Amino acid sequence: MSDFIEFENVSKTYEMGEVAIHALDDVSFSIEEGEFVVILGASGAGKSTILNLLGGMDTATSGKIVVDGKNIESCNDRELTLYRRSDVGFVFQFYNLVQNLTLRENVELAAQIVKDPLDIDEAIAAVGLSDRASNFPSQLSGGEQQRVAIARALVKNPKLLLCDEPTGA
């Protein structure tokens, strides 16, 4: 089996005025297709930075990031948008739900932007929220909102599912 993800000698430095913050310093790893991987580390260790780089939401200062044969570091803005839309499912630490849409509408929104989504109601059922589908985010607990975010990511049927603090609530 070949590597689905290649993260080679990746560094990320953020410039904050005159201060350089090294979020990642020469990090390398590979992940095979179908593999489940957990990244553990102390607060500020670079876990979210790795997810943002893999998801195409940020760019590395140096190094090479290949996902499913595509070097995402060499993608232009349009290619990165298509990559994020079609290939990646995100579950953010702060769920980013649309507050004036119901649970079902939040999940449906994600299904509308991809070519081959999963069934909306099946994705909602998979996270155990079928009976809450018509509720708005403000009517849900933190854990239920997190499960909506998971259903929204899953319904896209992504090649890569990235979860930042997925058990936080």
Image: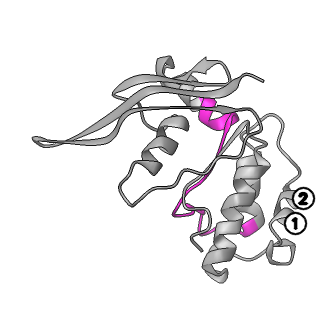
Tell which of 42 and 135 is nearer to you.
42
Q: Which part of the image, by quadrant, shows the N terminus? A: top right
As for residue 110 lying within the magenta part, the answer is no
The answer to whether marks 1 and 2 mark residues whose Cβ atoms lie closer than 8 Å is yes
Cα separation, mark 1 vs mark 2, equals 5 Å
Span highlighted in magenta in the image: 82-103
Q: Residue 8 placed where, x, y %?
A: 48, 24
Q: Residue 93 placed where, x, y %?
A: 52, 61
**SS category of the residue bearing label 2:** helix
Other-residue count near label 2 (Cα within 10 Å), few / some / many at <14 / 14–19 / ≥20: few
Q: Residue at x 68, y 28 (%)?
A: 4
Residue 150 occupies quadrant: bottom right
| Residue designated by label 1 | 125
| Residue designated by label 2 | 122
Residue 139 sits above or below residue 86 on the image: below
Other-residue count near label 1 (Cα within 10 Å), few / some / many at <14 / 14–19 / ≥20: some
Tell which of 75 and 62 is nearer to you.
62
Residue 103 sits above or below residue 155 on the image: below
Q: Residue 111 placed where, x, y %?
A: 77, 47
Q: Residue at x 71, y 40 (%)?
A: 113
Q: Which part of the image, by quadrant, shows the C terminus? A: bottom right
Residue 101 visible in the displayed image: no
Residue 75 visible in the displayed image: yes
- Side of 135 where 27 appears, left or right: left
As for residue 84 lying within the magenta part, the answer is yes
Residue 32 sits above or below residue 151 on the image: above
Q: Amino acid at mark 2?
A: Glu
Residue 137 occupies quadrant: bottom right
Q: Amino acid at mark 1?
A: Ala
Q: Residue 133 placed where, x, y %?
A: 80, 71
